[in-house]
Image (tube, rainbow, N blue to C red):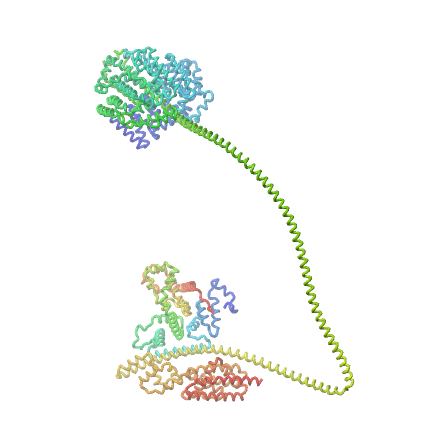
Amino acid sequence: MAEDPQRNFRSAYYEKVGFRGVEEKKSLEILLKDNPLDLEKLSTFSQRFPLPSMYRLHVWKVLLGILPPHCDSHCLVTRYRAEQYEDVRDALTAMRFAGGATPTTDLHLRMFQLENRQLRRRRELTAEDVDEDFLAISRSMEEIVDDPVDCYWLVKCFVSQFHNKFGDSIPHLPKSLEHFLSQEDPRLLAQLRASGCLAALPYSVWFKRCFAGCLPETSLQRIWDKVISGSCKILVFVAMEILLSYKIKLMGMKPEGAADFLSNIPQDNTDAMVTKAIDLWHKHCGTPMHSV
Amino acid sequence: MVVVANWVLCLFFVMNLYSNPIAERGSVLLNGLVDYFLETNSAQALHILSSVREPHDKHLLDKMNECMSKPGCRLPTLTLLGHVVRKQPSWIHKMARYPLLVSLLKCLKTDTDVVVLITGVLVLISLLPMIPQAGKQHLYEFFDIFGRLASWNMKNPGHVSEVYLIHLHASVYSLFHRLYGMYPCNFVSYLRSHYSMKENMETFEEVVKPMLEHVRIHPELVTGTKDHELDPTRWKRFEIHDIVIECAKVSLDPKEASCEEGYATMPEHFCAQLHLRPPDSAASPYTDLHSSYGLYSSCEYNSTCGMKDPLWSPSSLCGMATPPSSRGMSPNPELSQSASHLQNRLQNTPVGGKGTPSSSTPAASSPPPSLSDEFPPISLSQTASPPCKVTYSSSYNSRSVNFTENVDIILYCSSHACFMDSLLSAAITEELQKLTAEQRDQVALCEFDSPFYRTTETLTGAQDQKPFLSQDPCHPHEAVSTPERVEWCGGGSTRCGYSRGLSQEQPWSFQPVFTPIETPGGGSHIPPFQQSPVAPDDEAVKLGLLSPSPCQPPHLPYEALFDLALPRAATLFISKKTSELEVEEREVEGVSVSASPLEVLDQLVQQGSDVHDKLLKRLPLPSKSADWTHFGGSAPLDELQTLRSQLFLLQSQLLFERHKREQHAVRNRRLLRRIINATALEEQNNAMKDQLNLLNVEMLSLRESLVVEQQRSRQLWDDRETLVTRLHSQVRQLQQGRDDYYTKNQELQGKLQECQKRMGEMEAELQKANSKVCHTGHLLNQLTVKLSSSENTQQQMSFLHRQLLLLGEAHRLCMQELQHTGPESGKELEMLRVSSRRESERLKQSLLSQAQKLEVAQQRVAELEAQLSKKEHLIAEQKKFLEDVKLQAKGELSACESRYQAQRRITQALQSELLQLYAHMSVPDGPAQPASREGLDPTPSHSPPNGNASTLSPGQPKGKPSSSCPSSKANSINGSGDGSLPPDTNPTCPALTVGSYPSARSFLGMRARELFRNKSESQCNEFEEDRCASPTPRLTSLSQTLKNELCLEPASRVGGVKPAPTSGPATPPPPPPPPPPPPTPPPSSGTSTPPPPAQVSALLSPAKEAQASTKQRVSTRETPVRGTGGGHKKVPATQVPPRQQQLRIMDYNEAQAES
């Protein structure tokens, strides 16, 4: 990439001086110009740098397989996706699972369930069928994406990819959180352990929903960038950074209070927290390099 | 009671003084104690005051200074001061700074009381050596005091009695000595200035001049100056006793002078002369005093008793008789001197005409020998001890008798005791002797002396009945012999109060005798000795009984060794030490034993005065007056006063002298230590000398042995020399022999070398000859070879020569023959030559043409190869593109797939919904059906398609092959006899799966056409049309399009024969199966080349192409038939490839042919 004549020769120094993301957009554009898109390069890029918001959805779609790597077939595939969405929605409407008043998230949930053959008959619908994790992710995604078709597809693919890829590693994330916390701040860990807060941490919100509903969407996007590009470790570091940021408050809290507080984190400083978390993640797991 | 109270008070003071040293309190207590002492004259208070410690001295001195200002207290204060000074406390040097000294001096300058003056002067004299540096300030005050007191004698301003004047004179004499001894220059200059005045001349003549006769010239007068004298550094190296001795050294008076080294002889002579002379009042103030006192006392006694011989004077006797104690310690010459003194004294007394009984005692004749006996070694004195003991006890007994019997005598005795100088003990013995002697007189005398006698009788009445007293007479007075006295002398000199012999022998032996003496006196008068008269008696008896038994001090076995090892002084020292030790022991044993004779004397004086006071008080006035008048004396009170003060004076003088003696003793001890050190060193020296002798002897013996050894070594040396010479000669001989041999050897060796050299030469010659032989041999060989070759050549030459001859002959013959033949053969030859030339040209041309052909062919080959590579490149590109497209298609397909899946889900959901609805509709049918349907809910999809096959898209069955079993189930369930359908679907299935390839192939073909568009536009258009046609069915369903494409493919190849694309799904199935086989082989063979050649051929040569295509089609037509017939499609597939390869080869051939 450095040899690319189109790139600015100063680009190598921007990062040293502290300007991040100056050259990323350009390099991303270069990446996106390739006709069969190189998924590996794209995911590496996404792990290394924050995605520019204008390309974010496109990259997500490509990475999640909603769009094929070939740009020529994008139109076609997009149409297919839209038609599929329409079909499923119509079917649901026909089956009266959804009406005009049904919220999009519920509709999406039903659609997801239908496509995964998890949809029961309407009469047999129970509260258990309502997947809160999906709904939370769907809600957050709705905020991020305007188009309902895209939204549905992103949610669907995100959720299924997340479960397929990281379904096995999610139960181990609390352990690894403890491990990294012991490296960063053993005192806090000891305190949390002593006070019993450690067991009461909202792991489901953090790790099953990928912080959906916990952090504002602007911050969430950046975390999901990393998750979509193939790393669930970032969730651990975000959680750790949350703990470190509210260390003083947490020290004096009881487990129930801590759980409540962590489920409803103040939304003011999350960007900085996410930045720090990404730094921490880079620090502990190393900066992902191109595996060319 | 009072005494007890005093005791308590004293204890209280002591406790406070030692345990609570707060300054203020201490001062108050001290003041009280001083007051108490001034009032009561208590001995305990005195003791406490004189041992006051450092921080309290100021208060004491201040208090004393205060008391000094009161005239009434002066005398006791001075006494106290005297005691304190004599005690020599550590702080005494501070005296010079206190106002007490000033007030003392002032008192001495102004006071008129003689007693006070004398006491003061004595205090001053003893104080002076302690504060020598203080003289600087007060020097002229001292001198003034001296001047004043010296002139007192003459002027007698207070009109005091003569007796006091004598005392005063004595003290002035002492002061003179002290001042002269300490500050000679200043003092002499003072005397010079003071007595140069007219009015003082008389005093000088009378008083000072005789004193000057008793001093030597002080060395300081020669060497020192006035200032140097007062230099404090001068006094720093002196101790107090040093100063005293320094003062005594310059004195010529035997009483005052010390008999130390250097000065010893002269004073002795002087002394002897002095004593040989009849007693002279001017000779010495002491003798003067003594004599005067003696006179006085005798007078007094005469006056009081009237019975005494006036000429007999014990004091003069004592004064002359007693040798100085220091002399007692000195070695033999002095001893003899003292002995002579004693003799003198003894002789003197008879000469004086005093028929005292003491002199007439039988023992009195024996002193000289006994005196000499005193000093021999101690071992001797042991033998004399038994009598000693007896005498001692007897003397004491007698004294006790005296003491108890007559107070007067006690007084007298005590006054004598006080009067005794440093020769105290001797004086005591003397006195005791006298007393014992007198006793008999006095006993008789006392019968007349009624009041005293009576009183003593009353006092000692009880004691008279004691067995001891009754025993007393048993001791013969003759026992009071000189040995005893001598023993006393020794005891006095050692300051322990007991004779060496006695103490060594049996310290306890006299105790039983001694205690009874003490107890009566103490029991009646002295508080410390308050004991019941009976108890001591018992004790005494007990002790007496015990006394012979064990308590003997151990006889030290090494004492004899000491005697041998050490000189006399050392033995003396040892004896002194031992006696001291024993005294200590005795002191430990009990209070009654502890009292030394000196203390006894002090007590005696005290008691005497007390008794005197009491008696005086008890005496009724009339009788007193009568008595005194009866004795013919002056007024009794006056007299008593005088006596008392005299007693006091004597006591103070005694104390002064005792102090002086102590100083001497201190010095003696030091000297003794030096002596011991010296003797030790001497011993060491002797030992060293012995060692030296021993070493000398050893050296001598060593020297002798050295000589012997030298001789032996010399002999050995000689032997060796001879041996060496012999050996040398032998060696020389041998050397000569060796030399001979050596020369011979050398000669032989020379010869040998010569021979060797010759040998070498000969060898060289030999070698040379050998080489020559070899060379010649070699040459010979060469020559033989050459010879043979030359022979050979000669033969050849001859042969050739012959040949030559023959040839020449033949040549000659030929020439002849040639000349005979003609020119006809030339034409033919010419023709031949032309023909051959033409032939060659032709050949050349053909060669050229062939070369050209070859070149062309090569060019063609290159061209073809380039084409080939291009095509290969193209193929690779196409392959890549194919992959790309495949991927793209896969993406799209996956999208489709997902869509399809979604559709399926939808249909499933809808079906389930539908079924539910049906279930609702046919409620009466029974719940079994819905239940069964619900049970099959996850896989319900197969029955509906069967039922609604017409409504659904034709491609729908595509999904069926994967689930054939469920379909059968569905059949069984639904019961709708569609048994023909499953077989139908089965054949379609492979066609569809494989069908994807043709479609891809079509794309490939499209691409290929694009590439070769320039060559055939028309074909391209056709394909374009095909392409446009194909998308339309694509919309209907994927499978349809695929089928269409499959159908189109062969048609396009054939070149325009188009089967209807939308001929319907039902009809085409039979035809489509055939086309797949041809495409299948290419993937299996690995290349996709077959189609392009076909197309190329079709484009390039339609005619041939037509043939080929017909052939191909025939084959293709044939294969499906066979395939359908046999039911196997693989067979044609395997058969096809060889033909296609043939085709390809044909293509190439054609292409070549064309080019």
Check the image and report above or below for B1057 versus B633: below
Give the quadrant of residue A111: bottom left
From the viewer's side, name the closer residue of B649 and B546: B546
Q: Is residue B195 left or right of residue B451?
A: right
B1004 to B390, vertically: above or below = below
Is residue B31 shown to the viewer in this render? no
Q: Quadrant of the N terminus of chain B?
A: top left
How far across and down, in percent of the image, does residue B779 sit? 70, 65
Horizontal relation, residue A192 to residue B1: left or right: right
Q: How many labels sit on residues?
A: 0
Image quadrant for the C terminus of chain B? bottom right
Relative image position of residue B128 (x, y in whole percent): 39, 23
Instruction: Give residue B259's position: percent from left, percent from top.
Output: 40, 20
Res B29 → quadrant: top left
Q: Does residue B915 lie above or below B443 as drawn?
A: below
Can residue B760 be seen by looking at this rendering?
A: yes
On the image, which quarter does residue B344 sit in? top left
Q: Nearer the viewer, residue B517 or A226?
A: B517
Please name whichever residue, B753 or A272, is drawn nearer the observer in this view of the structure: B753
For the residue pair B905 and A18, the one nearer the viewer reads as B905
Where residue A173 sits in the image (x, y, percent)?
A: 37, 66
Q: Is residue B828 left or right of residue B305?
A: right
